[in-house]
Amino acid sequence: MSEASRPPRPVANAEASREEINFSHPSEREFARVLDFYGIAWRYEPTTFPLRWDDQGNILEAFSPDFYLVDTDLYVELTTLRPQLMRIKRRKIRRLKELYPEINIRLWSRSDFMRFLERLGLEDRSEELVGKEALEDQHVGS
C-alpha cells in the first residue's frame, strides 16, 4: 500500500468532563446515565476515524462513533433519531472496518435502543428518549 493510499491515523478528540458533554440526542444522555449507573467506563465521541481523503491527505469524510466502552474496547453508535440514517451509518461503519479492521464497533438502531429500555424497565420513557419528538422536547426544555 503506497503512502498516499494509507488511511490517515484516527484522531483522538479532547476528553470533556461529564458536565461539558453536549449530547446530540436524549437517547445518548440516557445511555451514558445507564453506563454510569452500572459502573461501565465510557468516553463520548473520543475518536474520529478518517474514511475518505484526497491525494494530499486532507480528510474529506470522517466518522466519530458516539461511545467508546473502555473495558470492552468497543465503540457504540446510537441511531435513534431517524431510521433513514441507518443506511448512511452502515456505509460508514463498513468503510471504517475496511480501513481499521482492529476496531470493534456496534451500531444500535432505534429498535435496539427500545429493547434496551424495555430490559431496564424504562419503556414508558421511550417518547422522551427516542426519535425526533425527543429532540424537540430537549430543545423546549433547554
Image: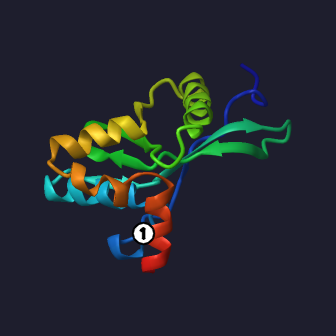
Instruction: Please identify the residue farthest to the top as the structure is shown.
Output: 1
* Residue located at (44% from left, 69% from top): 137
Residue type of the residue flagged with mark 1:
Ile
Q: Where is residue 41 in the image (x, y as percent from the top left)?
A: 24, 53
Count of number-bearing discs = 1
5 lies above or below 75: above
29 lies above or below 85: below
- Quarter the C terminus occupies: bottom left
Q: Position of residue 79 (x, y in %)?
A: 47, 43
Q: Where is residue 127 in the image (x, y as percent from the top left)?
A: 35, 56
The answer to whether residue 22 of the structure is visible from this angle is no
* Residue located at (20% from left, 59% from top): 36
* Residue located at (57% from left, 25% from top): 94
136 lies above or below 109: below
For the residue carrying disc 1, how many other residues have a C-alpha within 10 Å: few (<14), some (14-19), or many (20+)?
few
Instruction: Please identify the residue farthest to the right as the structure is shown.
Output: 55
The answer to whether residue 98 of the structure is visible from this angle is yes
- Quick one: SS at disc 1? loop
Q: Position of residue 38 (x, y in %)?
A: 13, 52
137 lies above or below 120: below
**Is 123 on the left or on the right of 109, as rendered?**
left
Q: Which is nearer the eye, 19 or 31?
A: 31
**Is 39 on the left or on the right of 80, as rendered?**
left
Q: Quadrant of residue 57?
A: top right
Residue to which mark 1 is pinned: 21
The scheme the figure's colours follow is: rainbow
- Quarter the N terminus occupies: top right
Q: In which quarter of the image is residue 91?
A: top right
Q: Which is nearer the eye, 25 or 99?
A: 25
